[in-house]
Amino acid sequence: MRRLVGRNVRRAREAAGLTQEELAEKSGFTQQYLSGLETGKRNPTIVSLYELAQALGVSHLDLVKPDNQS
């Protein structure tokens, strides 16, 4: 699940044309946290997912949606 969320966050960030640094500034999370999240090393809370989704302009459900990768 952590890897799935990480892939979805990265995909949404790239679709928004943002770097990790830009998303960090926009969301209030650190670039290090975002890096760990995108690589599946961080375990985000529901509140974190909601706040990231707001910063990315997507639904929080988009960040947990299956992407058919293992």
Image (tube, rainbow, N blue to C red):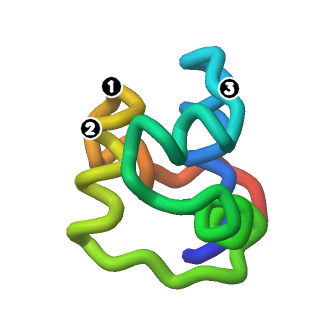
**Measuring 65% from the left and 35% from the top, which residue is drawn there?**
11
Locate residue 47 relative to residue 67 in the image: left or right: left
What secondary structure is found at the residue carrying circle 2?
Answer: helix
How far is the residue under mark 3 from the one under mark 1? Answer: 12 Å
State the residue position of label 1: 57
Q: Position of residue 66 (x, y in %)?
A: 52, 53
From the viewer's perspective, is residue 18 above or below residue 59? Answer: above
Q: Alpha-carbon neighbours of circle 3 within 10 Å: few (<14), some, or many (≥20)?
A: few
Q: Quick check: marks 1 and 2 in contact, CB under 8 Å?
A: yes
Q: Quick check: marks 2 and 3 in contact, CB under 8 Å?
A: no
Q: Position of residue 62 (x, y in %)?
A: 39, 42
Report the amino acid beneath label 2.
Answer: Gln
State the residue position of label 3: 14
Q: Position of residue 10 (x, y in %)?
A: 66, 43
How far is the residue under mark 1 from the one under mark 2? Answer: 5 Å
| Dot label at residue 1 | none
Report the amino acid beneath label 3.
Answer: Glu
**Measuring 26% from the left and 38% from the top, which residue is drawn there?**
54
What secondary structure is found at the residue carrying circle 1?
Answer: loop
Quarter where residue 64 is shown: bottom left
| Dot label at residue 54 | 2
**Measuring 70% from the left and 72% from the top, which residue is drawn there?**
36
Q: Alpha-carbon neighbours of circle 2 within 10 Å: few (<14), some, or many (≥20)?
A: some
